Amino acid sequence: MELLDNLALGFSTALLVQNVLYCFVGVLLGTAVGVLPGIGPTATVAMLLPITFSFEPVTALIMLAGIYYGAQYGGSTTAILINLPGESSAAVTALDGHEMARQGRAGPALAAAAVGSFIAGTVATVALAVAAPPLASVALRFGPAEYFSLVLFGLIVSIALARGSALKALAMIALGVLLGTVGQDIYTGTPRFVFDQRELYGGINFVSVAVGMFGVAEILRNLENERTRTAIVSTVKNLWPTREDRRRIVGPILRGTGLGAALGILPGGGHVLASFTSYAVEKRISKRQQEFGRGAIEGVAGPESANNAAAQTSFIPLLTLGLPAHPVMALMVGAFIVHGITPGPNVITDEPALFWGLIASMWIGNVLLVLLNLPLVGIWVRMLRIPYQVLFPMIILFAAIGTYSLSFNAYDVYAIAFFGILGYILIKCGCEPAPLLLGFVLGPLLEEHLRRALIISRGDASVFLTRPISAVFLALAVAALVVAVLPTIRKRREIVFAEDESLDEIPNPVPPPSPRAHDDLDELPPRVPPQR
Amino acid sequence: MPDVLAGGIFVLIGGAFVWGALGYGLGTPLRMGPGAFPMLVGATVAVLGLAIIGKGLVAGEVTSFGAIPWRAVAVIVLAVLFFGFTVRRLGFVPTSAVTALLTTLASSRVRLLTAVAVAAGLTVASTLIFVVGLQLRIPLWGPWLGF
């Protein structure tokens, strides 16, 4: 009953006119950036963050969340219609979805994706509403030692899920933590690494890092070899799936929802992992395995449900523990803090209207997305005709203005250039930017809780092992590290992932989408086998 | 050799932070000084960097970087720095126009007329969105222009 009361409170907040309006603006923008390759949700949220400062906190968060899950939707539309996954968790959708479009069945593919996403979004929102309060009450009993171990665990897990070299991902996390130490020390006030520049006392601005690493670096990569974007768009007719289609998508949608909801909680790109896992599962249990890769509707419905469910449940660690599981979540932490709210277990009791309003808005956002996506599919596809030569100057200019307007600090703008170049070089060397961003956000928390725990324990470091919850998190962190780094286990992991690799062997007349077609680099599928 | 370069960057930055942290006081475990945490993390970064270099040398693979868009790198960095430096001094409108124009020139395919048109359009759009729409308090024309 309490749940119903809470949801009623949530809906009464989320259904306020301005909240519905900005939820709509959010999912609209999200869909747009999901459709357009080269600009992803992370850069968009970073740019729009300053705009939301003048809003009510709940309105701001509703809009930012809308951008995030709207982008999951938009990516699948272009994946199906032109084999260009605007958002990389949609890369799997392109396999069968585009094949269906080539056979003149674009309508049912889009409908399967939309219906699957909607059902998954609804179920995952309920899962979020049910699971969050108990988790938050557990988290309330956490002391600094527990938080330290938890943050460490979160950071380590994000490499276990990252693709490519675990060593590089680990180094990127540590570098992010290191960059987070710039600025005044919280306990003594000593300015650290500021080169006597008063503007750096507040630390490096998170938005500069995000915009530089995800916006500028990505633009530089796109400018490496410029191609003309050709959009050959299949015409969409017969939107509704046949009775046979409807029967075939029920199972994949339900399984995809379950998988996605579970995997989304993991820090670090759970939604990409979810869509690939769902595709592998559907292919394995299907009676028509030979159809996969040649237009099987199950291969669209399953992964789409999975990535949307995961996008919703990735809010669980943010709302209950204050831990961002995705770079966009890290930006949301920034949004919470700007509005004077510390994300974490206290949000649910201190700001119930905000907490439940945000959850309810996700369901409303999912309804809006279905309404937006199916009838307006033509408009989204037409957006792809915007030439990149207009798009990237817009991103750079808006990013500079947006970052400057945060605190009218020219150093924040210079930092964009610095992190753009640093990010570009590191990405070229095979280092992903997402772990660095997570490290940068969580680093100050790590230091604060480490030092506070040691002060409370009178300098006795064994406190991290003698407190049971803390010890469990540390053990899990070590286990995750071992899984990610040890070569033998790593090989076994490659075998597990080998199922996914068979996707590439499917005879497919259309060349697989190039990695550059994806938006943010953090959105690349994690299944690329480690190069060694 | 991407691994060696990446490792080198990590060693360099990690080492620089360790060196800087030594000047801030390490303190004791009970009261950690401001330098203790950066030193710990800086050392970790440097060690990981060395490991990456080592791995790169052992593997010995010579992968090329591919094309580097030097023009785009230079122009975009210049554009962003220009924006940060002049937005107070020249004001919002001229700064946006120059930044947009510079950025547009990053593409090797762009024609001058297109660049001017895009820059003009973006300047109008950003003025409408940020100054008119969002009430951003940046003067449209700055002191360098006599305002």
Image: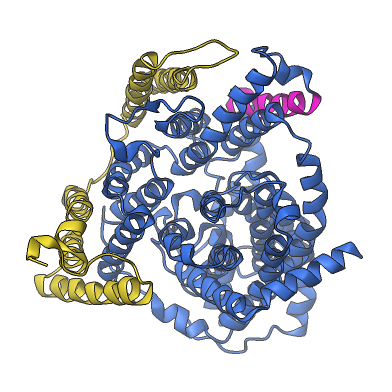
Q: Is residue A233 visible?
A: no
Residue A285 falls left or right of residue A529: right
Q: In percent of the image, x 57 and y 29: which residue is there?
A: A448
Q: Number of marks in the image?
A: 0
Q: Position of residue A19 (x, y in %)?
A: 60, 75
Residue A328 falls left or right of residue A344: left
Q: In percent of the image, x 57 and y 89: which residue is there?
A: A237
Q: In percent of the image, x 43 and y 21: which residue is there?
A: B42
Q: Position of residue A258 (x, y in %)?
A: 78, 57
Q: Is residue A165 above or below residue B56?
A: below
* Residue placed most toward the observer, A297 or A239: A239
Q: Which image quadrant for residue A449?
A: top right
Main structural element of the magenta stretch: helix, strand or loop?
A: helix
Q: Chain A drawn in what color?
A: blue
> Magenta residues, as a range?
A468-488
Q: Position of residue A227 (x, y in %)?
A: 28, 63
The magenta stretch spans residue A102: no
Q: Chain B drawn in what color?
A: yellow
Q: Is residue A412 above or below residue A6?
A: above
Residue A215 falls left or right of residue A283: left
